[in-house]
Image (cartoon, rainbow, N blue to C red):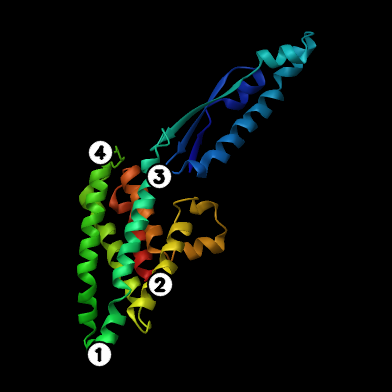
């Protein structure tokens, strides 16, 4: 989440009372993940400055603590916020709300596929041809994929969404996420007796996606047990790909492990 650069000769400069600039580069794609880290680092540097070895020499010269505090600040912090320095909500909460709301519409459609076939008396026949059930999911996947692409394009052109990755490379994890989400809706609605009761289950998928996918709070701050649960939620991986490729500009080759884990979970 952050990188701290300590300059050459830092310890020597500190004992000699010479100034040193410490570099601090912060991944600001999710500001709430690094705000406490930034505060702690500032407090740590303040404590180091207040106990610098050069203070003893200044006291020996007859200077008061107030005078010393005004003169000594040998360690200074130079911060640089990366990827979302203006804390623009379009790159944080807005993209999350749009993705999860549209995901709820997708679940509302795919979760009723099997109950509808059961009501029409066609389920037994379709089970004999598993490929048929898979083909029924593809139209929902395709429409959802197109809607996600158009939403990202509109947000970038109109609202200034940051997207610096390769759009064609990003289509691979995006399409995989749309397909897995469609299949998840199909599985969750499998044993529902009718379409009405199946529709009520969509909320069981939307709520965890909203709370545990990292939209509101960074996953890194969750307990380890909660992090494992969040890995099962497909939209969690979508946000990882979006932030890694879209906001940070990472290449697809850095995310093959994440793609394999996403496929392995489902």
Looking at the image, which is closer to me, 131 or 24? 131
Residue 98 lies, in percent from the top left, at 34, 52
List the residue tagged with mark 1: 121
Give the residue at the far front of this rendering: 196
Residue 251 lies, in percent from the top left, at 29, 48
Q: Is residue 5 above or below residue 146?
A: above
Looking at the image, which is closer to me, 241 or 254? 241
List the residue tagged with mark 4: 158
- Residue 185 can be seen in this image: yes
Secondary element under disc 4, as helix, strand or loop, is helix
Q: Around disc 2, counting alpha carbons within 10 Å, would you say few (fewer than 14), some (14 to 19), or many (20 or more)?
A: some
List the residue tagged with mark 3: 92
Image position of 190 (left or right of 153):
right
Q: Is residue 11 above or below residue 245?
A: above
List the residue tagged with mark 2: 200
Q: Earlier in the sequence, mark 4 or mark 2?
A: 4
Q: Earlier in the sequence, mark 4 or mark 1?
A: 1
Q: Nearer the viewer, mark 3 or mark 2?
A: 2
Q: Locate residue 235: give its quadrant.
A: bottom left
Q: Locate residue 128: give its quadrant.
A: bottom left
Q: State the residue at coordinates (48%, 43%).
A: 1
Secondary element under disc 3, as helix, strand or loop, is loop
């Amino acid at each position: 989440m952050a990188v701290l650069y300590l300059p050459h000769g830092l310890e020597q400069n500190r004992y000699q009372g010479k100034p040193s600039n410490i570099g601090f580069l912060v991944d600001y794609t999710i500001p709430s993940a690094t705000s406490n880290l930034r505060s702690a680092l500032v407090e740590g540097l303040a404590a180091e400055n207040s106990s610098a070895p050069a203070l003893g020499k200044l006291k020996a010269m007859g200077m008061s603590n107030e005078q010393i505090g005004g003169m000594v600040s040998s360690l200074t912090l130079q911060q640089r916020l990366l990827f979302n320095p203006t804390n623009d909500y379009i790159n944080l909460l807005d993209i999350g709300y749009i993705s999860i709301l549209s995901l709820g519409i997708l679940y509302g459609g795919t979760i009723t596929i099997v109950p509808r076939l059961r009501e029409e008396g066609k389920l037994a026949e379709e089970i004999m041809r598993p490929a048929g059930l898979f083909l029924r999911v593809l139209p929902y996947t395709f429409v959802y994929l197109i809607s996600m692409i158009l939403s990202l394009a509109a947000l970038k052109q109109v609202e200034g969404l940051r997207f610096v990755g390769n759009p064609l490379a990003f289509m691979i994890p995006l399409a995989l996420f749309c397909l897995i989400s469609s299949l998840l809706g199909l599985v969750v609605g499998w044993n529902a007796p009718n379409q009405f009761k199946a529709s009520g289950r969509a909320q069981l998928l939307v709520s965890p996606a909203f709370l545990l996918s990292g939209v509101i709070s960074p996953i890194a701050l969750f307990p380890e047990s909660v992090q494992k649960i969040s890995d099962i939620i497909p939209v969690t991986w979508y946000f990882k790909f979006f932030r890694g490729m879209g906001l940070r500009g990472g290449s697809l080759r850095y995310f093959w492990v994440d793609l394999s884990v996403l496929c392995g979970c489902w």
